Amino acid sequence: MHPIFDAILQNDLPAFLGLVEARESSLEERSEEQNTNNTVLHVAAKLGHRELVAKIIELRPSLLSSRNAYGDTPLHLAALLGDVNIVMQMLDTGLELYSARNNKNQTPLHLAFVSIFMEAAKFIVEKTNSVDLDELNFALSSGSTCIVGIILERFPELARKNAWEVEDGSRSTLLHYACDKGDLELTSILLGLNQGLEEALNSKGLSPLHLAVQRGSVIILEEFMDKSPLSFCVRTPSKETVFHLAARNKNTDAFVFMAENLGTSSPILLKKKDQQGNTVLHIAASVSCGSPLIRYIVGKKIIDIRDRNNMGYRAYHLLPRQAQDYEFISSYLRCDTKTSEEVDSKKAERNEPHIGHSEVIRLLKLIEISTSEIAERKKSKKHHVKRGHKSLEHEMHIEALQNARNTIAIVAVLIASVSYAGGINPPGGVYQDGPWKGKSLVGNTAAFKVFAICNNIALFTSLCIVILLVSIIPYQRKPLKKLLVATHRMMWVSVGFMATAYVAASLVTIPHFPGTRWLFPVIISVAGGSLTVLFSYLGVETISHWFKKMNRVGRGLPIYFIKNNRVEDIPAIAKNEGEMPSLARTNSDLAASEGSGYFTY
């Protein structure tokens, strides 16, 4: 190897200049390493030695167009390296270098796409005067979408050429290709060019949106909905709408998205028929796209399931017998298809007299409903109105019981939390050191012992309430009421012992000085007075409620009870069943509390 290449390999600019000064022809030397036939500029560009590259271009500009054994110019190697500074130095001398192709028909831009660094490719695209289709296609295959956007922004005419082939073999525009591949970023770039690409048709007469619907790409449909909503109205050569395509390809998500977001265009497109007279429902049934989509189409109530295509078939006629859930879908599509005209035509074939639909209904009424039955219905209608009111009250009663159950559970949890906190942090504090470290300072006093006992009873009683309410879930009124009565009693026990524990804790913590001796009697008075007033009121209400119940029975007033989830009165049931139900079955609490709207436990 010539010494000048050693200087380039070592990036030794003074040595390089000394060799050139000694013999200027050394700039024309070629490297024989691996038969590459590289010039000094090729080697310097390949190694990324910027200063050497700049000096060589200054001394011998003609080397920029030289080629090695592979047909590469120095710009090819600089682009492959991805050094944007060297590429800038070379392109500043002449943009004709950009279009040079090597033995593999690759331009410097091709090799720039292969580079790890995309800056060189971006610079070449921004400076060049033209980009070929093969270069754009190479950029797409390399995943350089950002560079593709720059290319299309400078040369938008490339996007309209039918130079791309999609999976069905048709030649199409770049937007067709992007929609077929589900490339959202490229689709967004192309729709933003305002070149009318969404209107272009491929060799099979399909628009880009048609391919997106066939693939079921909802994110692509959202992009079209935002930037080109009118493209949803374009139909295929066989007059199929976007809904036909979605149904034919079993793309339920795409179908529902379009139906819910196309606004006023949705019902219009859903009603359209294809060249064979098939509705969307015909297509969905013929490809066995599944019951969810078929039920959705029928549920929209836009398409008449009795519609026939040009062959005279309804949707259920096209359903394959091997389809999953054939019986269910078939019966679902047959619904409402048997019209009165069909019935009349069958009767005519059997020489039966023709009777209109309205006449049939009138005759049935005359035969089956007598005058006495009509009168009885009018009478029972009033009775049902009264019972409906009682049934509403019964439902309100059930709801009130459920609310009471939830309230008791919350109160029990609250009592358990307070009692637990009091047990862990006892009143009066604890010893901080010594053998009694962590023990209560007032553990010897009677008040603390009362506090400890009452606090523990309150804690575990409330825990029992919570466990009981969580473990037993009644779904009928009577068991629910029994459960509430039991837990209500337990709650009062828990509340009572918690109150006693608080009073005992107050006795422990209140200092017994002459000026504070009155505090404890006041606390006892407040606690005892408030509880006495409350229990007195509840006692009066309970006694009053029981008197109301006894008076109702004594006066022979109706007592209601539950039968078949309805509120019935005893005399009515006794008349029907021939016996008086026992008071154990009655709901006399509910009946006796009609006026006040509540009763106590």
Image (tube, rainbow, N blue to C red):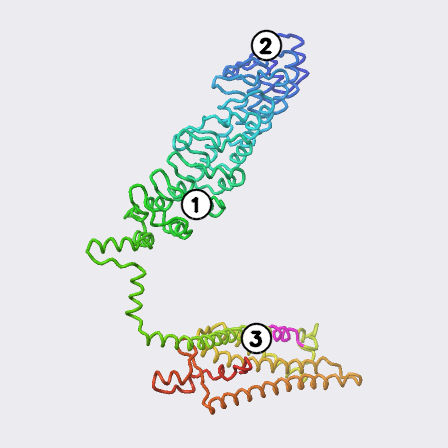
Label 1 – label 2 distance at C-alpha: 68 Å
**Residue 264 image offset from top left, x and y in percent:** 49, 45
Helix, strand or loop for disc 2: helix
Label 3 – label 2 distance at C-alpha: 98 Å
Residue at horizontal 39 percent and vertical 83 percent from the top: 572
**Residue 79 image offset from top left, x and y in percent:** 57, 23
**Residue 394 image offset from top left, x and y in percent:** 47, 76
Q: Is residue 446 visible to us here?
A: no
- Label drawn at residue 412: 3
| Residue annotated with mark 2 | 28
> Which residue is more in the foreground, 554 or 173?
554
In contact (CB < 8 Å): disc 1 and disc 2? no
- Label drawn at residue 255: 1
Please provide the residue range marked out in magenta.
417-426
> Which residue is more in the foreground, 94 or 567?
567
Of the residues under marks 1 and 2, which one precedes in the sequence? 2
Q: Amino acid at mark 2?
A: Glu
Q: Residues within 10 Å of mark 2 (few under 14, many from 20)?
A: few
Q: Quadrant of residue 336 in the image?
A: bottom left
Q: Amino acid at mark 1?
A: Phe
Residue at the far right: name it. 515
570 left or right of 159 in image: left
**Residue 301 image offset from top left, x and y in percent:** 41, 52
Q: Amino acid at mark 3?
A: Ala
Which of discs 3 and 1 lies nearer the camera? The answer is 1
